[in-house]
Image (tube, rainbow, N blue to C red):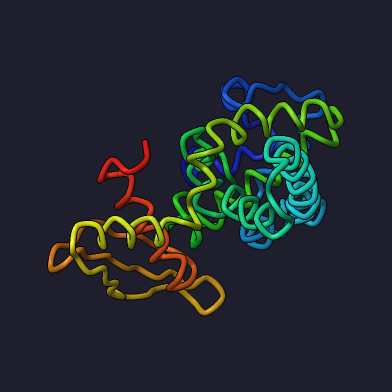
Amino acid sequence: MNYESNMNYDSADFTPLEDRIGYHFKDVSLLRTAMTHSSFANEYHLRKVTHYERLEFLGDAILEYISSEVLYEKYPELSEGELTKRRASLVCEYTLSKITKELGYGDYVFLSKGEQLTGGRERKSILCDLFESVLGAIYLDGGMEPAREYVNQHLLTDLEHKTLFTDSKTILQEYAQAKGLTVSYDLLGQSGPDHQRVYNAQVRLGDTVVAKGTGNSIKGAQMEAAHIAIRDLGLVK
């Protein structure tokens, strides 16, 4: 969906996206709202349009509940603190945005011209929001069971690897120590307005750059770089 097709707001065909999601809406206006960024609503003065932030709010709460329940049942030996850490890793921006990017959400989101021209369709923060807004829409349209199925199908698979994100720096550090190497991180730059700052970082083993990452904080960029590094090094699949 390009910028011009944004104008087909009321007639956009979401069927291919629904096929990928695995859920077909009875009220497709809920999915349309879930795919409407506030910049689009503001630019076109669509007073009757509710952008996705309310659905994101709802979806965030539902996601926390479903993921907490699954982790609680799967890991009976873990403490509250350890479960919280695993949940944070599982529902982090990196993981959710990766899922929605693969599903093609960026092709369907309605954005303002400015947001689109500055890379909004690829922006991790927006793609992450869309996972939660669509979850909220599914819940309102079909209830908890299809909402749970959406989360199970697209997120709660391969839990062991998906919950490694927050441990990536530790895993890389332990690998480096075993090899007699040092780990260091470099901030390559930052861009975007204050409320949407994007940081770029790289990680080095010794003098060799092994991966680069981006995030909405320096720590987030470093964590992504470390996660990509341990994946590329074959430490995780």
Q: In the picture provided, is 60 more to the left or to the right than 12?
A: right
> Residue at 50% of width from left, 57% of height from top?
166
Q: Which quadrant would the C terminus be assigned to in this image?
A: top left
Q: How many marks?
A: 0
Q: In the picture provided, is 127 more to the left or to the right than 119?
A: right
**Could you say which is closer to the camera, residue 36 or residue 92?**
92
**Could you say which is closer to the camera, residue 145 or residue 183?**
183
Q: In the picture provided, is 115 more to the left or to the right than 209?
A: right
The spot of residue 7 in percent (x, y) is: 59, 43
> Residue at 75% of width from left, 49% of height from top?
64
Q: Quadrant of residue 232?
A: top left
> Residue at 26% of width from left, 72% of height from top?
184
The spot of residue 230 in percent (x, y) is: 32, 49
**Could you say which is closer to the camera, residue 37 or residue 221?**
221
Q: Which residue lies furthest to the left in this view?
A: 207
Q: In the picture provided, is 33 more to the left or to the right than 140?
A: left
As drawn, 74 above or below 205: above
**Could you say which is closer to the camera, residue 32 or residue 24?**
24
Q: In which quarter of the image is residue 57?
A: bottom right
Q: Which residue lies furthest to the bottom in this view?
A: 194
> Residue at 68% of width from left, 49% of height from top?
78
The spot of residue 138 in percent (x, y) is: 77, 33
The spot of residue 43 in percent (x, y) is: 63, 61
